[in-house]
Image (cartoon, rainbow, N blue to C red):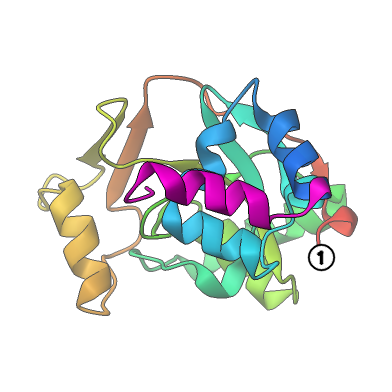
Amino acid sequence: MFSEHHDIHEYLENISREDLLNIERLSNCCSWLFLKQNLRELIERRSIDLYNDFICCGRNYPIILMPIDLLKPHEDIELERMRILEKDILERGILEKPILVEMNTFIILDGHHRYNIFRKIGKRKIPALLVDYNDPCVEVSSWRPEIRVSKDLVIKTVLENRLLPPKTSRHILCFKIPEINLSINMIP
């Protein structure tokens, strides 16, 4: 967030008219998107284009095309599961749902197989629903009874540059993730 009130006005004065119109377009959903420091920097560097990369909203959270190289996985994948999913996505030519990403850290919460598929086929971006881990609407539990999963564990795993076993964490939202059914040919 901006440290002082005048920073907001300074930012708004220095962005292009086109970006202002795009921010206005987002106002029904999540105009606060550009106020997050890390996201604002991506917009300023043109890593995210508000007009072309904004897809829709899930609750008050944006679904945008995120640069793949900024995302941080916390779980390993199952190769056979990835092969089956890759075949399905390529044959159908669509991605039904966005991956789930924590907006402050860019940690992938759900969608590690889709993320790896998109990297493998040379995509630079992937549709991602950006959520705030501090929101009580975002919960985490474990698929594996032998591993106790918490938000702190997920973050610590990434900070230590390691991965949890496949299908360890189960992230649950208080709303349904919207289907986007986006053609993979439309994704850079």
Residue 119 to residue 7: above or below: below
Say which residue label 1 marks: 188
Image quadrant in which you'd find residue 98 = top right
Q: Residue 177 location in percent, x, y?
A: 54, 28
Of all residues, the one furthest to the right in this rendering is 185
Image quadrant in which you'd find residue 43 = bottom right
- Residue at (60, 69) in percent of width and height: 68
Q: Identify which residue, 119 or 86, lies in the foreground.
A: 119
Q: Residue 34 location in percent, x, y?
A: 55, 46
Tell me, yes or no, if residue 65 can be seen here: no
Q: Residue 59 location in percent, x, y?
A: 52, 22
Question: Is 61 positioned to the left or the right of 88 in the image?
Answer: left
Q: What stretch is highlighted in magenta?
A: 1-17
Question: Is the stretch drawn in magenta largely helix, strand or loop?
Answer: helix
Question: Is 131 positioned to the left or the right of 155 in the image?
Answer: right
- Residue at (55, 52) in percent of width and height: 10
- Residue at (10, 48) in percent of width and height: 148
Q: Within 10 angstroms of label 1, few (less than 14), some, or many (20 or more) residues?
A: few
Tell me, yes or no, if residue 54 can be seen here: yes
